[in-house]
Amino acid sequence: AADPLQILMIWTGGMSFHGGLAGVIVAMVLFARRRGLAFLAVADIIATVAPIGLFFGRIANFVNAELFGRPTDLPWGIVFPNGGGVPRHPSQLYEAFLEGLVLLVILAVLARRQSFRRRPGMLAGIFLAGYGVARFLVEFARQPDAQFVEGTVWLGATMGQLLSLPMIAIGLGVLLWAARQTPARTA
């Protein structure tokens, strides 16, 4: 709050997915306008391939030993170099699986269905809601951001969970709106 311009200084730290998504949406709007395309049709195409990038991004988080999980006594707990010497949830792998592989398979199967392809926004809505749910769930095992001393921000929820709730709501809203539209004709 003291220095709002810090939000734009991505070179001084990481960029959360939620901030990156806002930038991608702006880029998609500009691209769709410039090319004379329907925004939701562009969003559907991007949504179907985005899980691939999310998968590799989370694998990179794991390899870099960053964004690891909370301490655990489960047999698959991993001792990360900067994790305090205790086994922790490999939450990056949980996210790679849910946000990457599971969401990719769901979207790939649905993208093959005529009923989804003919209603722009359906796939984008499923992506937003699906990512939001996956992220919300993994946050229970993920180490909260260091700037939040107690780990939670409001009513026991982490910042990642709070940021995922609007994604879920918007995703469901887009999905319901698209489902109510008259199907587009296909050639």
Image (tube, rainbow, N blue to C red):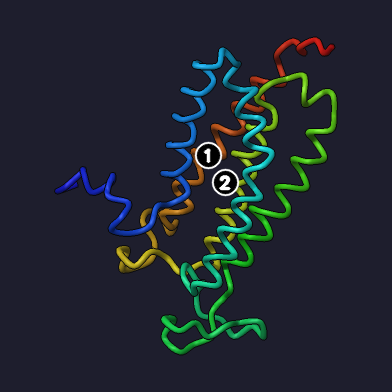
Give how far apart the Cα atoms at labels 2 and 1 are: 6 Å
Residue beneath the point at 19% across and 47% down: 1
Q: Is residue 3 above or below residue 120?
A: below
Q: Position of residue 142 (x, y in %)?
A: 51, 67
Looking at the image, residue 139 sits to the left or right of residue 16; the answer is: right
154 or 22, which is in the foreground? Answer: 22
Q: Position of residue 86 (x, y in %)?
A: 49, 87
Spot the residue most to the bottom: 85
Q: Quadrant of the C terminus?
A: top right
* Res 19 label: none
- Precedes in sequence: disc 2 or disc 1: 2
- The image quadrant of residue 94 is bottom right
Amino acid type at mark 2:
Gly
158 or 82, which is in the foreground? Answer: 82
Amino acid type at mark 1:
Met
Residue beneath the point at 32% across and 63% down: 148
Q: Position of residue 96 (x, y in %)?
A: 63, 60
Residue picked out by circle 1 = 167
Q: Is residue 172 above or below residue 89?
A: above
Looking at the image, residue 123 sits to the left or right of residue 28; the answer is: right
Circle 2 Cα neighbour tier, 10 Å, few/some/many (<14 / 14–19 / ≥20): many
Looking at the image, residue 124 sits to the left or right of residue 144; the answer is: right
Whether label 2 touches label 1, CB < 8 Å: yes
Q: Position of residue 99 (x, y in %)?
A: 64, 53
- The image quadrant of residue 26 is top left
154 or 75, which is in the foreground? Answer: 75
Q: Is residue 183 above or below residue 100?
A: above
* Secondary structure of the residue carrying numbered label 1: helix
* Res 132 label: 2
Q: Is residue 117 above or below residue 12?
A: above
* Secondary structure of the residue carrying numbered label 2: helix
Residue beneath the point at 30% across and 64% down: 147
